[in-house]
Amino acid sequence: MNEELQNKLKKAAAVRVADYVKDGMIVGLGSGSTVRMLVDELGRRVQEEGLQFTAVATSILTATQAKKLGIKVVDLDSVDSIDLTIDGADQVDSNFNGIKGGGGNLLWEKIVAINSKKIVWVVDESKIVDTIGAFPLAVDVIPFGSQHVLAKFNQAGFEPVIRKDQAGHVFKTDSNNIILDLHLHKITQPVELADELIKTVGVVEHGLFLNMVSEVVVGKESGPEVLVNPNLG
């Protein structure tokens, strides 16, 4: 899929999912390229339609964009719960298990997600796969002792790589942690893997989001399609 078509599908899906946001809602806004399109559309609705809602952002970048567009943004700790969180995903399988963290914001994304009454992901059709794992799995790790975590992951055969930014420096998250990207190729036992990762001392969180999402809005050439999780939808 070429980039122009991919962006077109993302845009159509983002406009569709923006309709989920209603007046008075508290809405979690995720991170990534598709969510940036969503925030643009929500900003348009705020300015042109008078939409009024409160946002909780999963990254400093999303918060900055939303504020510039006139969207009210508050801290997660200032609300009791979130009505709806809309986020992107790097891969989603037929069991509604997903990989997130390509943008490095998986920790804040998961904290917002678990405090949400409903989670909706918005993706283009290239993100829908039979088995997750071809996309590198991000693991949020504290810097102290991170070389030892790296060594443990190497011993386990996870093929970890310390994420770097475009300048070649070690990437730092909004919480000032680092990201280890695991090159697993195929994840056949995601629940067991998630348990193993989170039990590793030094790991703060991982990018496996398992059976958490209620709906996935998929941008397709034929138009956006909504996939409903039968366990949560």
Image (cartoon, rainbow, N blue to C red):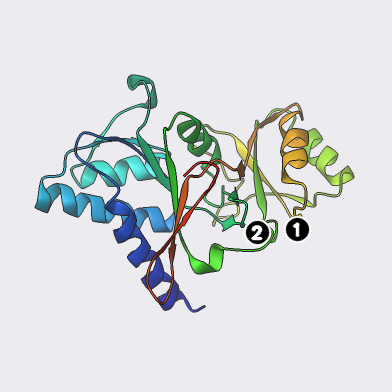
Between residues 142 and 106, which one lies in front from this camera angle?
Answer: 106
Instruction: Identify which residue is drawn at 40% across, 70% down.
Output: 9
In the image, is 153 to the left or to the right of 225?
right
Q: Nearer the viewer, mark 2 or mark 1?
A: 1
Q: Which mark is residue 135?
A: 2
Depth check: give the residue in front, 170 or 75. 75
Can residue 31 be seen at all in this image of the molecule?
no
Q: Earlier in the sequence, mark 2 or mark 1?
A: 2
Q: Nearer the viewer, residue 140 or 34?
A: 34
The amino acid on which the numbered mark 2 sits, given as a three-letter code, is: Phe
Type of amino acid under label 1 = Lys
Estimate the x, y position of residue 54 in percent, counting from the top left: 25, 34
Q: Is residue 127 above or below residue 88?
A: below
Q: Position of residue 76 (x, y in %)?
A: 38, 26
Q: Position of residue 4 (x, y in %)?
A: 41, 77
Q: Could you tell me which secondary element the residue under label 1 belongs to?
A: loop
Residue 125 bears which disc, if any?
none
